[in-house]
Image (cartoon, rainbow, N blue to C red):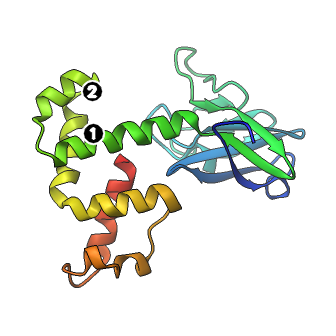
Amino acid sequence: MESGFVPVIEVMEVPPGRSKVVRVAGKAIALFNVEGVIYAIENRCPHEGGPVGDGEFTGTTITCPSHQWQFDVRTGACAHDPSVIAKTYDVRVADGMVLVDASRLLQAARRHRTLLRRVAAGDPPEAIARECGLSHQEVERTAEAARIGERLLYFGELYLRKGRVGGGDLQAVPYRAMKPIDGEVLAALDALARLL
Ligand code: FES
């Protein structure tokens, strides 16, 4: 398999004229089948973050359900504003599977994981922001996640490996002290997974 490409679904799950939202390395990606060729864009509208892949898909155009901006699924180009482009991802098909180029996604995940480790180790957020070229808010969000605790990092890594964290994982030893394991904890894990 070409490096960076990860299998996501079987080709038959997204027939011509149809779309499907999948998760790749923790990110939602919308797939579109245009006459047998599959395209992928981030399922986060560049306008205000709406779930663009849930909109109406006709020909080569997806209409975001939030405010009806339209995008060409082949290029990510926006019909309303040429300066706006939805993030696209390369796609391959092999052995009946759709493969998406996740190298950029994995890079971002690794960068955030390194950042999270440094925040957990007590490095000052200002220094990290300067060195990594991140905004102060990005570092603060990570610092907030780090305050939740080292054990969440454990689950963040689990999330990266498995793509999800289930109730069974929460019973694992490093998390035993936190009781009860409830919706709030799951929400915190989701927030951490988004940062990773
Ligand atoms: S969020 Fe997609 S059009 Fe506004």
Q: Earlier in the sequence, mark 1 or mark 2?
A: 1
Q: Quadrant of residue 93?
A: top right
Q: In the rendered picture of this protein, how many numbered marks are placed on residues?
A: 2
| Most foreground residue, 180 or 78 | 180
Q: Which residue occupies 29% across, 79% down?
A: 173
Question: Please, is residue 28 above or below residue 89 in the view?
Answer: below
Q: Position of residue 74 (x, y in %)?
A: 73, 28
Q: Nearer the viewer, mark 1 or mark 2?
A: 1
Q: Which residue occupies 64% across, 52% down?
A: 21
Question: Please, is residue 82 above or below residue 64 in the view?
Answer: above
Q: Quadrant of residue 85?
A: top right
Q: Residue furthest right?
A: 35
Tell me if 84 is positioned left or right of 176 in this view: right
Tell me if 193 is positioned left or right of 180 in this view: right
Q: SS class of the residue under badge 2?
A: loop
Q: Position of residue 67 (x, y in %)?
A: 51, 39
- What numbered label is drawn on residue 134? 2
Query: CA–CA distance between discs 1 and 2?
Result: 10 Å
The quadrant in which the N terminus is found is top right
Disc 1 marks a residue whose amino acid type is Leu
Contact between labelled residues 2 and 1, with CB atoms less than 8 Å apart: yes
The residue beneath circle 1 is: 115
| Most foreground residue, 186 or 106 | 106
Q: Which residue occupies 19% across, 22% down?
A: 130
Disc 2 marks a residue whose amino acid type is Leu
Q: Quadrant of residue 179?
A: bottom left
